[in-house]
Amino acid sequence: MWSDDAWQAAGPVYREILALPFISELAAGTLPAAKFRYYIEQDSLYLKEYGRVMAVMASRFGDAGSSRLFLDCAMENLDSERALQESYLKKDGLSASCGARISPTCLLCSSHLWRQVVAEPIEIALASVLPCFTVYSEAGRHIAGHAVLDGNPYRDWISLYGSSSFDGATDRLVVLCNEAAMEVSPSVRDRMTEAFVSGVRLEWMFWNSAYNMEDWKI
């Protein structure tokens, strides 16, 4: 299936994600609070755009089932993430709209996703939104399986992403991608894989930028 081939192509990048100090220190509970707060702030900014992108994706489908999947992602699934963000930010007297400036990497991720969803064929768009689902599902389970939870200040985050709460949406999106890949030419299928791998690379960039607390150089 296309999803298996795409995941295999992205394998080297995904393994680099698991090797990031952000991931290992998050699991160990030793990640500096300032780095995690930076990540939460940037993720909050990203999710605002991500929710809008999902709504646009929903409008591109003619069948109610597919549209509902993306509307659910725009509304229900993001609510739990935003609630978790709020809980962490409020510990520091902040809010999800605390006025943090979007980082270069966060802007790149958001802009890339918008371009794929608006300007590319639906098959490419589907492959472009899948990495966020797949990487967080896989990495979340990895972190939960290696985490030290006792006294870990990020226990709630680990519990959310290490659970199966996002698996249903991920599985449904994988099915959509595989169905789309069966209907297109080999060249478009290759472009789907390229789009997926690019998305996984951007996931690496996002976590890496959070650990480095990336800022604009000018």
Image (tube, rainbow, N blue to C red):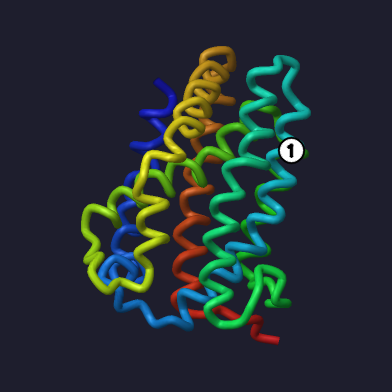
Give the residue at the far bottom of this rendering. Answer: 218
Relative to the observer, which residue lies in front, 91 or 202? 91
Left or right side of 74 for 24: left
Name the image quarter holding the N terminus.
Answer: top left
At x 71%, y 87%, the residue is 218
At x 61%, y 82%, the residue is 93
Relative to the observer, which residue lies in front, 96 or 202? 96
**Vertical arrangement, residue 91 with respect to residue 175, above or below:** below
x and y, in percent, of residue 156 in the image: 40, 61
x and y, in percent, of residue 70 in the image: 65, 33
At x 61%, y 49%, the residue is 79
Q: Secondary structure at mark 1?
A: helix
- Residue type pointed to by label 1: Ala
**Vertical arrangement, residue 76 with respect to residue 186, above or below:** below
x and y, in percent, of residue 91 in the image: 53, 78
Left or right side of 119 for 205: left
Relative to the observer, which residue lies in front, 145 or 135? 145
Residue 32 placement: quadrant = bottom left
Determine which residue is flagged by label 1: 55
Number of numbered tags placed on the structure image = 1
x and y, in percent, of residue 98 in the image: 70, 76
How dense is the environment of label 1, judged by Cα within 10 Å: few (below 14), some, or many (20 and up)?
some
Left or right side of 215 for 56: right
**Vertical arrangement, residue 49 with respect to residue 22, above or below:** above
